[in-house]
Amino acid sequence: MKRILSLYLFLMIIFFVITTHGTTETGSIREKYKVIIVGAGVAGIGAATHLLKNNFSDIAILEASNRLGGRVYTAEFGDFLIEYGAQWVHGQGGNPVYEIAEHYKFLYIQTWDMGKDFVKHSDSKINMSAVNWLFIEAVQFFGNANDMMLCNCSVEHYFNNKFNELVKDNNIDEYTAQAVADHIKRTQSIRDGAGNLDEEGSWGSAQYFWPNGSFSVAWKNGYHSFINMLMGKYEGTELPLEQKTKFNKVVQTIKWTGNELEVTCEDGSHYFADHVIVTVSLGVLKVSAKTMFNPPLSESKLAVIEAHGFDVVDKIFIHFEKDWWIFNFRYKITFLWTNEDKQRFKNQSKYGGWTTEIVFFHYVENQPRVLQGWLTGDTARLMETLTDDEVIGAVMELLNWFVGNQYSISQPINVTRSTWASNRFVRGSLSFPSVKSDRLGYSAANVLAEPILFNQTPVVLFAGEATSEKSYASVQGGLETGWREATRILNL
Ligand SMILES: Cc1cc2nc3c(=O)[nH]c(=O)nc-3n(C[C@H](O)[C@H](O)[C@H](O)COP(=O)(O)OP(=O)(O)OC[C@H]3O[C@@H](n4cnc5c(N)ncnc54)[C@H](O)[C@@H]3O)c2cc1C
C-alpha cells in the first residue's frame, strides 16, 4: 500500500510540474511561462507588477545582476545612503513616479541655489560680477523647444550660435564667456547624458516632455523605496516579484520559431515563453542586438539602435572627516574655467588634469560629510579605470587649486563612484536623440518600441527608457514603457 501511495505522490508531482511549467525533458524540467521579462530595472519591474496586479501570474523575470532596480541603485555610504544611478524625481504633475510616491510622503522638494556657488581660481581673469547674469540668461536657451527644433542641428551648434549672439550684444569679455559656456555645456551634458553635445540632436531633444513642478524632488530614504512601492511592500500586499525573478541570468539569445520563444542564458539554461519583453538598456542592445535575436532584428531597428545616442554619466562621492564647506557654500561648489585656467591646471597636475571635467560637487541629502561630483563621456570612462587613491588624489588636487587657499579642506576618509560604462549589463547611463537618429527622419524611440509580430501577435516586445518617445532617460520613462508593454499583452 505504501508503495502505491508513493507512486501516486510521484505521479502527482510530475503532473503538477507539467501543468504549471510545460513538459519535462529527459533529465531537466522545461520551464515555460506565458511571459518572460528580460531585465529587472524599473521597466521590467513596471511590466511585471502591472501583469501581477491584473492576475496575470505566469511570468518570470530573468535578471543578469544579483539585484532589482538596474539604474535605480541606492547604496549605503558615509553616514546614510547614496544614489549611484537615478537621484531625483524630475517634475511632479504628469510624472507617474511623483504621483505614486507622493501618497507615501517619502519625497521632499530640494532647493537648488542656482548660480550662487561659482568659484574661480584666484589668478583667473573671469569677471565674477557678470557670471550669474550670463548663466541665467544663457541656460534658458535649452528651454526654447521651437528654436531647437528649427535649428535641427547638434545641441552644441544650437547653443554656440545663441550664446555667441548674447555675448556680443552684451559686450561680455571672452574669459567670462568661455567659463560660463563651458559650465553650461558640461551641465547640459550631464542632464542629457550626452558626453559630447556635438552628437546630441536638437530636434529630438526638443521633443522631451518635462512634467510640471519641481525638477529636483528628492527621496527621504533613497530611490530604492520606489521599487518597494511598486512591489506593494508598504501596502502589506506585497506582489511576489522577488519570487518571480531569477537573478544572475544573463540572457544571451532569444530565438523564436512560430509563436514559441526560447530564451538561452550564458549559464546554458533555457526558458520557453509565448512572449518576451526585452528591457535591457540601449547600451546593451548596441553591443548585442545583432547576436541576441534569431531571426535577426529588422534593418530599421538595427539602424536605430546604432544611431540613437547612449553615453555615460558618473558620480564620485567623497566622505570627509568634517563638513569643511558648510558655512561657505549653500549647496554646491561650481568650478569655472577659462581655456587658459584649464591649461595651467593641466600643466601642474599630477593626475593628468581630468578633473577639469567635473562640473561641480554638491551636498548629498542627509549626508553631512559627503560631497558628490559629476562627470560625463570620455572623462567618466577614464575615471572608472582609476584606483580609489588616484581618484581621491585628483579630487583633492582640484579642490585645493580652487579653494585651498581660503578654506581648510579636511581629510577624505573614503570614496566611492559609479561605474556605469564598465557595467556590462548597462554599458552607459542614459539614452538621448543623436544627430544621427534625428537624420533618420522618424522617431527612433517608436521604432525601438515596435514589437515583433508572428501571425499579428506580438512575440518579442521592447520596453526600457530608450523606447520612450518623450520621457527617455528617466525613471518615469522606463516605468511607462514597462506598463505599455504589459498592457499590450493584457489586451491580447
Ligand atoms: C547616473 C544616473 C543618474 C540618473 N538620474 C536620474 C534622475 O535623477 N531621475 C530620473 O528620473 N532618472 C535618472 N536616471 C535614469 C534612470 O535611472 C533610467 O532611465 C531608468 O532607471 C532606466 O530603467 P530601465 O528599466 O529602462 O533600464 P535599466 O535600469 O538599465 O534595467 C535593465 C535591466 O536589464 C538587466 N540586463 C541587462 N542585460 C541583460 C541580459 N543580457 N540578461 C538579463 N538581464 C539583463 C540589467 O542588469 C538591468 O537590471 C539616471 C541614470 C543614471 C545612470
Image: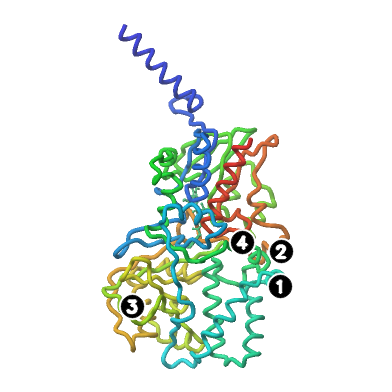
Q: Which mark is residue 326?
A: 3
Q: Are marks 2 and 3 in contact (CB under 8 Å)?
A: no
Task: Tell me: residue 192, above or below residue 183.
Answer: above
Q: Which mark is residue 369?
A: none
Q: CA distance from mark 1 to mark 4?
A: 19 Å
Residue highlighted by disc 1: 151
Residue beneath the point at 32% across and 9% down: 3
Please tell me which of labels 2 and 1 falls first in the chain: 1
Residue 287 appears in view: no
Residue type at the position of mark 2: Arg
Residue highlighted by disc 2: 439
Please tell me which of labels 2 and 4 falls first in the chain: 4
Q: CA distance from mark 2 to mark 4?
A: 21 Å
Disc 2 packing (10 Å; few <14; some 14–19; many ≥20): some
Q: Quadrant of the N terminus?
A: top left
What is the secondary structure assignment of the residue under circle 4? loop
Residue type at the position of mark 4: Phe
What is the secondary structure assignment of the residue under circle 3? loop
Q: Nearer the viewer, residue 386 or 333?
A: 333
Q: Are marks 2 and 1 in contact (CB under 8 Å)?
A: no
**Number of numbered markers:** 4
Residue highlighted by disc 4: 209
Mark 2 vs mark 4: in front:
4
Mark 1 vs mark 3: in front:
3
- Outermost residue, top side: 1
